Each structure stands twice: as structure tokens, then as C-alpha cells.
Image: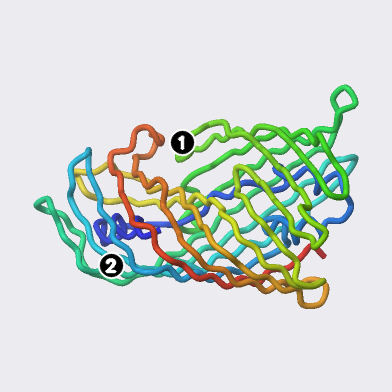
């Protein structure tokens, strides 16, 4: 997350935006479609919840940035993020489901101890914030091929840094086959296709494996490409867990600088790893706290019309600690 600060300050006076590219979890969890217990699935998989607001604080970390494989700046950064989403059911008929999801992200950045390696670098100590919206239209269909259940899904996402124009369209399409389904074990396999210039891989495997490991209720949840988790209930309404999740983020810039492309985007892939706790209040409200280490696996910049392989700026960031508070709603 700290890498975004590099371009945001370097391109001071430009327009920018920030958005999260989220996988459509209905496509990754066919169990949600095949079973009627939507609340049980949403407790297990947070991205299936009706709504969520998450506040995250990141520790201070070192960043370094290269332009065309030449070092040009570095320093320390620290930030915070408030992200939210709300899913609206639209309609369903004969195994088909349509919904819409609205996303919002607010970022708060702090940059200090800046070292500029190349002449003319504009990066300096600064504090600033960014906000953006994203809108997804989600479609899924439950069917059968030769008497084998199958779930198809398509997700169209528009992201931007303002309400006047859309900066990027993304598409995710998937097919998943539920192979095993018992009270203690479930397994679904499939593939996810991404039409997204920021994606390093156009096709990813879907592996959704759940297993109850003990009589005490310890759960193993393998949810690729989203994450892996061990979850233990403490009571009917309380759970502890430890695991790792992945998210992708994109920000947009118009530098108005003759040495840079007219429109560029900055893209990161982040892993959060650590323990957490959740508690269910009543029937619908879940409060969660978590913490651990945030690692940026990839941070690249490329121009409009290009893709991940054409990146001309690459950043490296040290892993930093994070703390997170989340309030979410189960499906009504």
C-alpha cells in the first residue's frame, strides 16, 4: 500500500484515484448457490456478506522505486485505509442470480525521509488522502453438465476516481464444479478468467476446499485465489482464526508531465497474514478485529492501453504490521 504514495506525491497537482479490484465471491463459492443457508456461508466467507466497513492502520515501512530499472527515489511511508462495500440483490430466476456491488475506498497517506536519486524527481515529504468508487454487476447461473453440478459466473466492474468518467472496465468470468459436498467436507474446482490489464495472470485456478478437522469445530478453509484460513469457534457466536488473504488495488493518474505518458495507472498485489477474532451480535451484525503483516508482492506502473508486462515503474516495499477493525452484515 505504501508504494502508491510514491507516484501520488511525485505527480503532485495531478488528478488521481484509488480502487480495489475484488473477485466476485459468488463465482468462487458454488456452495452458496447450491445450499439455502446463505448466512452460514457468509460467516465462513466474509466477501459473501451483504455489507462491510473496514478500517485498517498500517505501520511505517521503507519504500524504493525504480524507473526503467534505475533507482530514482525512496523513503518511509505510513498510511490508513477505510474501505466498504454493499451488495444489492437485483433479481433471480431458474438458477440465475443478478446482483450489484458498490465499493468505496478512502486512503490516508504520510510520506517522510525522502531520498531522491535522480535530478528533477518531485517526490517530497507530504500528507494527503484519496477516495474512489467502484461498481460491479454480478451474474451467476447454476446448471448441470452430464448430471454434474456447475456454476457459471460473470462480473463486470467499473472503477474510477470521480463521478464524471470511468477509468477502467474489468471482467471476471468463472466456471466451478462442486465435486464433494457433505456436512464436514466440501470441494469445488474451476477456473477464473480475468480481462484486466493489471492482472499478471489472465487465468487462475479456483480451489474451494472446506473441512472440519476436529470435534471441537476447527475448520480448514482453502479459498484460492482469495486465501487460506484455519478457523476455530469459541462459542455459538464467536470465532478465532489465522490465515492469509490477497487483494489487488489500482490507482489512476494524469501527470501532465511531458516525460511521462498522459494517463497511467499504479497497481499492487497485497497479502495480509495473521490472526483475527469475530463476534456475531444478534442475527446479522459481525464485529471483527485482526492484525499481522501486510506484504506487497507486486507494485507496477504502466500507461493507458498497456498492461502488467509493460510496466515502466516498479516499486519494492518492506512488509509492515497492520491492525484492522471490521463491521459487517450477514445476508438479510
Residue in the foreground of this view, choosing between 191 and 125: 191
Q: Earlier in the sequence, mark 2 or mark 1?
A: 2
Q: Secondary structure at mark 1?
A: loop
Eyeballing the image, is 195 above or below 125? above
Residue at the image point whose x is 71% and y is 56% from the top: 45
User: Residue 29, percent across and down?
Assistant: 74, 45
Q: Are marks 2 and 1 in contact (CB under 8 Å)?
A: no
Number of on-image labels: 2
Residue at the limit of the structure toward the bottom, as seen here: 281
Residue lying farthest to the top in this orientation: 146
The residue identified by callout 1 is: 200
Residue 297 position (above or below residue 112): above
What x and y, as percent, mark residue 30?
78, 42
Callout 1: 10 Å neighbours few (<14), some, many (20+)?
A: few
Q: Nearer the viewer, residue 188 or 203?
A: 188
Label 2 sits on residue: 111
**In this image, 59 relative to 116: left or right?**
right
Quadrant of image for the N terminus: bottom left
The image shows residue 170 at horizontal and vertical percentages of: 55, 41
Near-viewer residue (278 or 112): 278
Which colour style is shown? rainbow
Label 2 SS: strand
Q: Position of residue 5 (x, y in %)?
A: 32, 60
Question: How far apart are the two marked residues, 2 and 1, measured between alpha carbons?
Answer: 28 Å
Q: Residue at x 54, y 34 (%)?
A: 195
For image coordinates 77% across by 47% down, the residue present is: 98
Q: Residues within 10 Å of mark 2 (few under 14, many from 20)?
A: many
Q: Residue at the spot x=38%, y=39% of the render?
A: 304
Q: Which quadrant of the rendered structure holds the C terminus?
A: bottom right
**Dot label at residue 222:** none
Residue 39: image quadrant is bottom right
Kindly indicate the quadrant of the structure image that contains residue 207: top right
Amino acid at each position: 500500500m505504501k508504494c502508491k504514495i510514491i507516484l501520488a506525491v511525485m505527480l503532485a497537482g495531478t488528478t488521481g484515484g484509488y480502487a480495489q479490484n475484488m473477485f466476485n465471491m459468488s463465482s468462487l463459492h458454488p456452495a452458496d448457490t447450491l445450499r439455502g443457508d446463505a448466512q452460514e456461508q457468509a460467516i465462513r466467507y466474509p466477501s459473501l456478506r451483504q455489507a462491510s466497513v473496514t478500517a485498517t492502520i498500517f505501520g511505517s515501512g521503507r519504500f524504493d522505486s525504480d524507473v526503467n530499472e534505475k533507482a530514482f527515489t525512496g523513503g518511509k511511508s505510513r498510511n490508513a485505509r477505510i474501505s466498504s462495500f454493499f451488495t444489492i440483490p437485483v433479481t433471480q430466476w431458474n438458477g440465475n442470480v443478478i446482483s450489484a456491488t458498490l465499493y468505496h475506498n478512502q486512503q490516508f497517506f504520510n510520506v517522510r525521509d525522502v531520498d531522491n536519486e535522480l535530478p528533477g524527481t518531485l517526490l517530497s515529504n507530504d500528507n494527503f488522502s484519496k477516495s474512489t468508487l467502484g461498481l460491479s454487476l454480478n451474474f451467476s447461473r447454476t446448471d448441470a453438465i452430464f448430471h454434474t453440478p456447475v456454476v457459471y459466473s460473470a462480473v463486470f466492474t467499473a472503477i474510477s476516481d470521480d463521478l464524471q468518467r470511468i477509468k477502467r472496465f474489468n471482467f471476471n468470468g468463472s466456471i466451478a464444479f462442486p465435486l464433494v459436498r457433505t456436512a464436514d467436507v466440501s470441494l469445488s474446482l474451476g477456473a477464473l478468467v480475468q480481462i484486466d490489464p493489471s492482472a499478471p495472470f489472465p487465468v487462475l485456478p479456483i480451489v474451494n476446499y472446506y473441512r472440519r478437522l476436529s470435534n471441537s469445530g476447527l475448520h480448514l478453509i482453502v479459498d484460492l485465489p482469495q486465501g487460506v484460513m484455519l478457523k476455530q469457534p469459541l462459542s455459538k457466536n464467536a470465532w478465532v482464526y489465522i490465515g492469509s488473504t490477497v487483494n489487488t488495488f489500482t490507482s489512476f493518474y494524469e501527470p501532465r508531465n511531458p516525460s511521462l505518458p498522459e494517463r497511467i495507472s499504479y497497481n499492487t498485489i497485497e497479502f495480509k497474514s495473521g490472526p483475527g477474532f469475530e463476534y456475531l451480535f444478534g442475527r446479522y451484525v459481525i464485529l471483527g478485529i485482526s492484525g499481522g503483516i501486510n506484504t506487497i508482492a507486486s507494485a507496477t506502473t504502466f500507461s493507458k492501453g498497456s498492461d502488467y508486462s509493460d510496466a515502466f515503474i516498479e516499486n519494492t516495499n518492506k512488509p509492515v504490521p497492520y491492525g484492522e477493525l471490521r463491521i459487517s452484515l450477514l445476508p438479510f
